[in-house]
Every structure is written in C-alpha cells, then in structure tokens.
Image: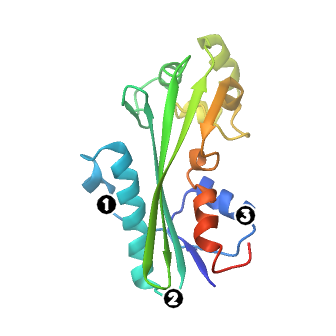
Amino acid sequence: MPILLASGSFLKNYILEKSRLEYTVLPADIDESVYDDMDVMERVVKLAHAKCKLVADQHPDHVVIGADTLTASIDGTVFTKPLPNTDPLDAAMQLSGQTIDVYTGCCVYTPEHKFHDTLAVAQITYQKFDRASLERLADGDNPQIRSGALGVFIDAPGFTLIESVQGSYTGMFGLPMEFVYQQLASRMSL
C-alpha cells in the first residue's frame, strides 16, 4: 500500500527511511500561523492532522503520515528558532541544566477514510554546561549550534550534553514510529 509523508522535514524523512518502509515525500503546504494561539499540545496535533488531511484529500487511496513538533520548557516557554540578530550560543545556553518537553503530534490517514491522531511526548534533561563547552562544540561553524539548537540527533555534537531522555524516542526527532507502526500493522506485514 503506498505511503505518503506529508512533510519535507529532514529528520522525519530520515526516520521513515531508516524504517525501510517504501514511501514518497509530499510536503503539505499549510499556513501554520492559524494555530499559533493554541496550547502547544493541541497545536501540534491539529497541525499534524491538517497536514495529513491536505495530502489525503488529494490522494485518498494512500496511507498518509503527517507530523508536527514543538519544544517547550517545563514552565511552558516554547523554544523557537532564534531571531536573526540573536547570539545562538546565548539561546543554547538557556538549555544548561534544564528539562524540556518535546511534543510531536502525528496523524496517520488510512484509505478506509480514517484519521488516527496522537500526541507523543519526550522529556530531555540537559547536563549543566558552560559557554566554553558550547564554543568547543560550535567550532567549525556547527549548524545546530549556529541555529541555537543543541540537537539530540547523534550527528549533532549537542547530544553529548544530554543527561537523560524519557518518552517517545523517535517522537523527539519528529515522528513517533511506535504510533506509525501500530497504525500500519494491520495493513502491512511489519
């Protein structure tokens, strides 16, 4: 059964590629600002559903996967990409010794015209670190540090500053495969 990934995200694509499922990327182009006033958890689920629905309406005979991810601190502050004139190391320093929640909404559409939504949560606790540690990791113009993100991906040097991770492992990268596999299990031999 054909699978469409309604996202152009590098990490979502990478996760699905590593699952060894055959799929095609067909990014959903939606106005995400419509959801800006929603609670973080509600927002990611609604965005994932909207992306999935847009592609499913165009391809009703395919399985469609949509997902959206946001990161927030325990106090509810949403982390976004730093503004252009912001020092990315200052932005990354905010994570020292902090615990953050990564919320990923995921929607899987099946050709039986059913949408299945979920919210996956991962909690990441960072070690306490200093600016010198970040500068060492940023050496060579590291793009993750340059963008103000430390990255949990093994190719991102910032993953060495993580103390612990709880929750959905692939959800923290943007695609909770435990949920995707569950939705596909009855349609494919997984």
Please identify the residue farthest to the front as the structure is shown: 186
State if disc 2 and disc 1 touch (CB < 8 Å).
no
Three-letter residue code for mark 3: Ser
| SS for dot 1 | loop
Three-letter residue code for mark 1: Asp
As drawn, is 75 to the left or to the right of 108? left
- Residue 49 vs residue 14, the one in the foreground: 49
Image height of 77 relative to 133, above or below: below
Q: Position of residue 10 (x, y in %)?
A: 61, 55
Decide which of tag 1 and tag 2 comes sooner along the chain: 1
Three-letter residue code for mark 2: Asp
The CA span between labels 3 and 2 is 22 Å
| SS for dot 2 | loop
Residue at image position (63%, 33%) is: 165
Please identify the residue farthest to the bottom as the structure is shown: 61
Reading the image, the residue beneath label 2 is 61
Reading the image, the residue beneath label 1 is 31
Residue at image position (52%, 18%) is: 93
Residue at image position (60%, 23%) is: 126
Reading the image, the residue beneath label 3 is 19
- The image's mark for residue 149 is none
Q: Position of residue 163 (x, y in %)?
A: 66, 24
Q: Position of residue 110 (x, y in %)?
A: 51, 79
Residue 28 in sight here: no
Image quarter hosting the N terminus: bottom right
Residue 20 in sight here: yes
State if disc 3 and disc 1 touch (CB < 8 Å).
no
State if disc 2 and disc 3 touch (CB < 8 Å).
no
Q: Nearer the viewer, mark 1 or mark 2?
A: 2
The CA span between labels 1 and 2 is 25 Å
Q: Position of residue 85 (x, y in %)?
A: 40, 28
Residue at image position (36%, 31%) is: 76
